[in-house]
Amino acid sequence: MSIDQESQMSDAEIDDFLGSHETGVLSLARDNDPYSIPISYGYDATARTFYMRLVSTPDSEKRAFLASEPSARLVVYDGTETAYQSVVATGHLEEVPPDELTVEHIEQYGEARRPLFEIWADSKADLDIELYEFEPETLSGRQTVLDLEGEGETRVDQEE
């Protein structure tokens, strides 16, 4: 198996991809300490902004990272036997206080279908639900097509 073609995604392709997916991996970093979690998101292609409901307990590692205003990176990816796509967004999360919610916010958070509270070991009363907006400073996508026969060796290199 070899890479037949690898290319950068256009802005329209990135927006379509993000709009057709709902989960990714959010990585937070403070100093030299990383933290990554699977999350669900809503995405507004016009504003190129993500909306996330993050659930944690008050003394959790996630809450400690979020309180430190860390750098953030969101990776959304998908793949088949013959193709792979990924989008990487970098920037900082911004908490949205409940008293500042707009109708547009509520619509976007409705797209963030997870987490399902039933999966948490703690009772619902012990969970903190905080809303975040993520307007990335950088947003890039890549798609790779694989040659399963191993004959095509065409590769288009792109800068990261």
Image (tube, grey):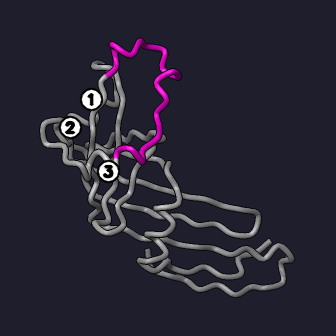
The numbered dot on residue 68 is 2
| Location of residue 82 with respect to 60 vertically, above or below | below
Task: Tell me the quarter of the image containing the N terminus.
Answer: bottom right
Task: Please give the name of the residue rendered at 49% of the width and 77% of the height, measured from the top-left corner.
Answer: 9
Q: Mark 3 points at which residue?
A: 72
Which tag, 3 or 1, sits closer to the chain's start?
Answer: 1
| Residue in view at x 64 percent, y 66 percent | 84
- Image-based side of 58 in relation to 21, left or right: left
Identify residue type, mark 1.
Answer: Ala
Q: Name the residue under label 1.
A: 64
Q: Is residue 108 above or below residue 56?
A: below
Measured Cα–Cα span from mark 2 to mark 1: 7 Å
Q: Is 113 in the magenta?
A: yes
* Crowd class of label 3 (few under 14; some 14 to 19; many from 20; radius 10 Å): many
Q: Are marks 2 and 1 in contact (CB under 8 Å)?
A: yes
Q: In which quarter of the image is the C terminus?
A: bottom left
* Most foreground residue, 136 or 51: 51
In the image, 100 versus 5, the foreground residue is: 100
Left or right placement of residue 42 versus residue 102 in this view = right
Question: In the rendering, at what x and y percent does residue 24 appear?
Answer: 49, 50
Q: Where is residue 8 in the image (x, y as percent from the top left)?
A: 50, 79
Q: Does the magenta stretch include residue 91?
A: no
